[in-house]
Amino acid sequence: MRIVIAGGHGQIALRLERLLAARGDEVAGIIRRAEQTDDLRAAGAEPVLCDLESASVEEVAAHLQGADAAVFAAGAGPGSGTARKDTVDRGAAVLFADAAVRTGVRRHLVVSSMGADPEHEGDDVFDVYLRAKGEADAYVRGLDALDWTILRPGMLTDDAGTGLVRLEASTGRGPVPRDDVAATLVELLDTPATAGLTLELISGSTPVSVAVKSVAGN
């Protein structure tokens, strides 16, 4: 497969790129800073320079040409203010989805956040973040031209992955290693029957492949 990942230099994205490249997939990661290119190449991905905060839908669509799947893993990141929660966590997600529709790339994964809700209340930065992610998720879910799956991990950690997770429509809160989030994204890409699902992910006792097959009804 050829997979294009928005937010290609993110911590989950770099892990995902390594996993996909190691098994022979063609991976491209969209980044906005040229100094990030070496890290992507080291992960086995093709770096694509494109600022999703300023690009047009046509520009992003050009980078999606020929892709079999698209993964939105971008985020404004810790330390960013409320304005960038809107331009990246909401705006870039909407733009990337629109570009996928325009290009005809149906399979579309979104790395969201547990608690994302367009009706979330509050004015703190994290409140704005959860609202922005929720608005982006709602937009993607409204696009009939996409076979979308939205993954909402719990508290992300840098612990080594165990390959054991809990993946359900609602898991309750809990931590999950970024390694296991990336592994779950690979399985979701390989399981088209998970299209149309919004899933929460935390550490658990079920192997990733079994957990994904279970939610897919297999």
Image (cartoon, grey):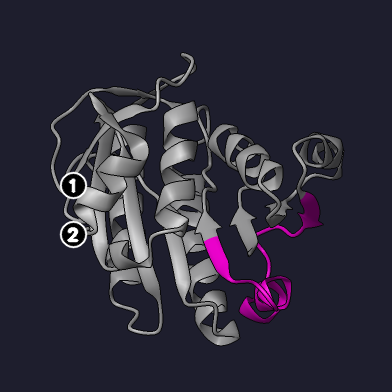
Please name the amino acid that badge 2 sits on: Gly
What segment carries the magenta color?
A: 46-70
Question: Is label 2 in a helix, a strand or a loop?
Answer: loop
Question: Is label 1 in a helix, a strand or a loop?
Answer: loop
Mark linked to residue 173: none
Horizontal side of 71 relative to 211 (left or right) equals right
Residue 196 placed where, x, y %?
26, 68
Q: From where the camera sits, is residue 130 visible?
A: no
Q: Pointer 2: what residue?
A: 217
Vertical comparison of 26 with 153: above or below: below
Let me know if residue 52 is in the magenta part: yes
Q: Pointer 1: what residue?
A: 120
Q: Count residues near mark 2 (Cα–Cα under 10 Å), then give few for <14, some for 14-19, many for 20+.
A: few
Please name the amino acid that badge 1 sits on: His
The C terminus sits in image quarter:
bottom left
Horizontal side of 159 relative to 125 (left or right) equals right
Answer with the quarter of the image where residue 207 lies.
top left
Residue 32 placed where, x, y %?
74, 50
Q: Going 49% across and 48% down the picture, which residue do you hit?
A: 186
The N terminus sits in image quarter:
bottom right
